[in-house]
Image (cartoon, rainbow, N blue to C red):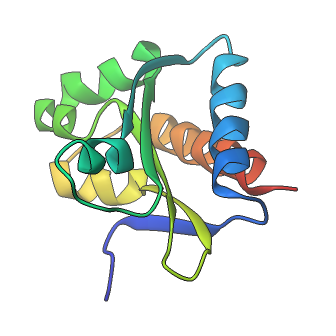
Amino acid sequence: MENTGIITKTSTVSFEQTYQQLKSVLENNPNLKIIAELDHQNNAGSVDLSLNPTRIILFGNPRLGTPLMQNAQTIGLDLPQKILVYQEENGTVKVAYNDPLYLKERHGVTGKEPILEKISNALHKLTEVAIAS
């Protein structure tokens, strides 16, 4: 299965540790604000369905996201930024997020390459912290 525009990394630590490391690095970055956390496994359980551990955390920096939305408002469908942490059936823990360069193409963003590069670098660094032992 091809996941166009999705960057996925394999974690070297447990699901819970991956998620907590991600949350901690976000909370300790003064430029970022956590907006919401969703526990898909818990939501599935609330209707008697099972799901491997799956959580998503939404966060943002309006100084970076707003200029993108001023350029192409439909990018608001993909903002704020979000990172998914999930555990596969075999126990492998993954993190996944939207590739900002894919979002550029998807929404027709023009002239915002420095912002997109900054976001791309930030997402890479945040997820590297999350998956490290």
Image quarter where the N terminus lies is bottom left
Going 31% across and 18% down the picture, which residue do you hit? 66
Going 45% across and 26% down the picture, which residue do you hit? 59
Residue 74 in picture, x, y percent from top left = 11, 37
Q: Nearer the viewer, residue 40 or 65?
A: 40
- Above or below — where is 5 with respect to 14? below
Image quarter where the C terminus lies is bottom right
**Most extreme residue toward the bottom, as rendered?**
1
Q: How many marks?
A: 0
**Most extreme residue toward the right, as rendered?**
133
Q: Report if residue 66 is visible in the image.
A: yes
**Most extreme residue toward the top, as rendered?**
30
**Most extreme residue toward the front, as rendered?**
48
* Residue 73, image quadrant: top left
Residue 92 in picture, x, y percent from top left = 62, 74
* Residue 25, image quadrant: top right
- Above or below — where is 97 with respect to 55? below
Q: Is residue 19 left or right of residue 98?
A: right
Residue 61 in picture, x, y percent from top left = 47, 19
* Residue 27, image quadrant: top right
Residue 24 in picture, x, y percent from top left = 71, 27
Q: Nearer the viewer, residue 17 or 45?
A: 45
Q: Report if residue 110 is visible in the image.
A: no
Going 23% across and 59% down the picture, which residue do you hit? 49
Going 40% across and 36% down the picture, which residue do you hit? 81
Q: Is residue 83 left or right of residue 10?
A: left
Q: Is residue 99 left or right of residue 71?
A: right
